[in-house]
Amino acid sequence: AECIVNEDFSIRSKLLSKSSIIHYSDQGLPVNSCNSEDVVRYLTEYEKENKDTIPFTRSIGRIGWLKKEFFPYAVDDEIVFEDAEHTDLVHSLCQNGDYDLWLQTAAELRKNPFSRVFLAASFASPLLEPLQNRVILLHCWHASRSGKTATLKFALSVWGDPMQLMGSFNSTAVGLERRAATLRNLPLGLDELQVLNERKLSPAQIVYSLGNGTGKTRGSRNGKLQETP
């Protein structure tokens, strides 16, 4: 047996709750509403009896700083990413292509003030938390075919595959919130503002939500508060 310890310590409380542990049935855990209480009791006793022998693997549900480590780029040992919904994001954070060509292209793009500020913001993103600075929001508006999307893609290519890292305004408030929470200390790039359904979500709501740096406070079925991303 192996015990996975989440660095945010949120997964432990969910596994030891008969109501929230049912959610892990989506990941293959044989638990349901009929046996959840017995499973929690079993896990509690199992951990107690084997606390000195169970190997531990660290896990995390977001990207970014973990004390002095930075997942997934600079970590001391293996860390398992536990968010199955956003696994593609982590897989896209890889090195690929010709670095010298990328560097030459970056030098050329920096001659343009708009490209330069987007590239600088991308590099600055991981520095905001340790420097205790607030969220940076950039909005680039110009005529069609002017290179806005290409600029955004190149800025995101600092960290990995820009096609996977770039999001869209064709989303819900919860979807944008969860994507921002998963990326955490990396830039959230959103393209094509015109696809936004303003009857359900306005640009002002997005700006206030993302600029605030925290998600919406929500209640849970058991009367408590959900974890705020």
Image (cartoon, rainbow, N blue to C red):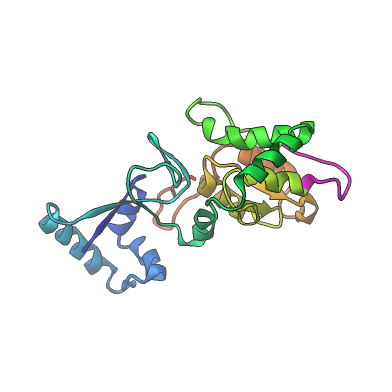
Above/below status of 210 relative to 11: above
The answer to whether residue 79 is magenta is no
Magenta span of residues: 138-148
Q: Residue 183 or 111: which is nearer the viewer?
A: 111
Q: Nearer the viewer, residue 135 or 21?
A: 135
- Residue at coordinates 42% horizontally, 41% vertically from top-left? 74
Q: Is residue 116 left or right of residue 43?
A: right
In the image shown, does 146 or 179 lie closer to the viewer?
146
Q: Main secondary structure of the magenta part?
A: loop
Q: Is residue 154 visible?
A: yes
Q: State whether residue 188 appears in this view.
A: no
Quadrant occupied by the N terminus: bottom left
Is residue 140 inside the magenta stretch? yes
Residue 128, quarter of picture? top right
Q: Position of residue 229 (x, y in %)?
A: 49, 45
Residue 171 coordinates in the image, percent (x, y): 67, 57
Could you say where residue 125 lies in the image, as x and y percent from the top left? 57, 35
The total number of labels drawn is 0
The quadrant holding residue 142 is top right
> Which residue reaches farthest front?
100
Q: Residue at x 71, y 53 (%)?
A: 169
Q: Position of residue 41 (x, y in %)?
A: 20, 63
Q: Residue furthest right?
A: 143
Front residue of this view, candidates 212 and 1: 1
Which quadrant holds residue 27?
A: bottom left
